[in-house]
Amino acid sequence: MKRSVLSASCISLLLATGCDTQGLVENKPAEPTATAPAVAAPADNAPAVGGDVASSGAAGEGQKAGVGVGIRGDSLRNEEGVGKMIAAPAVALFNAREKAVFEIQIPHALNLFKALEGRVPKTHEEFMQKIVQANGIQLPELKPGTRYRFRPDQGDAGELWVEPTE
């Protein structure tokens, strides 16, 4: 509640003071060149989806779970102009939450498990029960058609991946 009041206050203040957005909004050329769309499309999609997500490279195999795999904030990542300025704080919040789960909570829980048991979880079910549920970790909601899968043979302590459902 306090965050929404603070956000609304900040936006109202910016609108009331008439801040100059001329330097903040990207200017687009009047006539796009033939090479502009081909160059702009990959640059827009690659970092905006989540710069920390490691892709396996092959379609349909999945990717390592990281920032950008969740559904929250996905529709805001493609905003342009003033919409991008408004959506950026929300996208940053969702990215920070995902980063905390994938880069802090899960590795810490895996290290604790490894110290107590002397091994990594052997199966996905054991990972979900003894790592996620036992530590109260709330995994980000995934995009439709994908699921989490723990791979114990990846890395030192196993890795959590996002795979397409079959």
Image: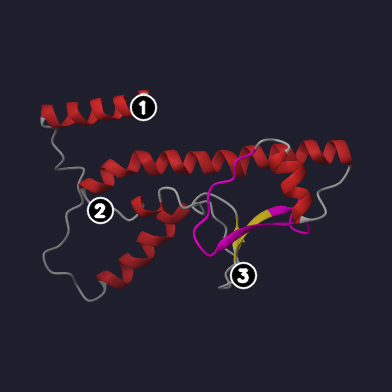
Q: Amino acid at mark 2?
A: Glu
Closest to the observer: 32 or 111? 111
Q: Residue at x 73, y 37 (%)?
A: 134
Q: Is residue 143 magenta?
A: yes
Residue 156 appears in the rendering: no
> In the rendered image, which residue does mark 1 sit on?
3
Q: Please state the horizontal and vertical placement of residue 50, each as a whole percent of the image.
A: 47, 52
Looking at the rendered structure, the secondary structure element under dot 3 is loop
Q: Amino acid at mark 1?
A: Arg
Asked whether the beta carbons under mark 1 and mark 2 sit within 8 Å of each other, the answer is: no
Up the image or down, 145 lies above or below 2; here it is below
Q: Nearer the viewer, mark 1 or mark 2?
A: 1
Q: Earlier in the sequence, mark 3 or mark 1?
A: 1
Q: Earlier in the sequence, mark 2 or mark 3?
A: 3
Disc 1/disc 2 C-alpha distance (Å)? 24 Å
Residue 98 appears in the rendering: yes
Up the image or down, 50 lies above or below 132; here it is below
Disc 2/disc 3 C-alpha distance (Å)? 31 Å
Q: Residue at x 89, y 42 (%)?
A: 118
Q: Which residues are magenta?
A: 137-159
Up the image or down, 144 lies above or below 59; here it is above
> In the rendered image, which residue does mark 3 sit on?
61
Q: Please state the horizontal and vertical placement of residue 19, each as a whole percent of the image.
A: 14, 32
Q: Which mark is residue 76?
A: none
Disc 3/disc 1 C-alpha distance (Å)? 39 Å
For residue 44, side relative to residue 121 (left or right): left
User: Chief secondary structure of the magenta span?
Assistant: loop
Q: Residue at x 83, y 54 (%)?
A: 122
> In the rendered image, which residue does mark 2 sit on?
80
* Colour logic: secondary structure
- Badge 1: residue crowd in 10 Å (few <14, some 14–19, many ≥20): few
Of the 4 image quadrants, the one containing the C terminus is bottom right
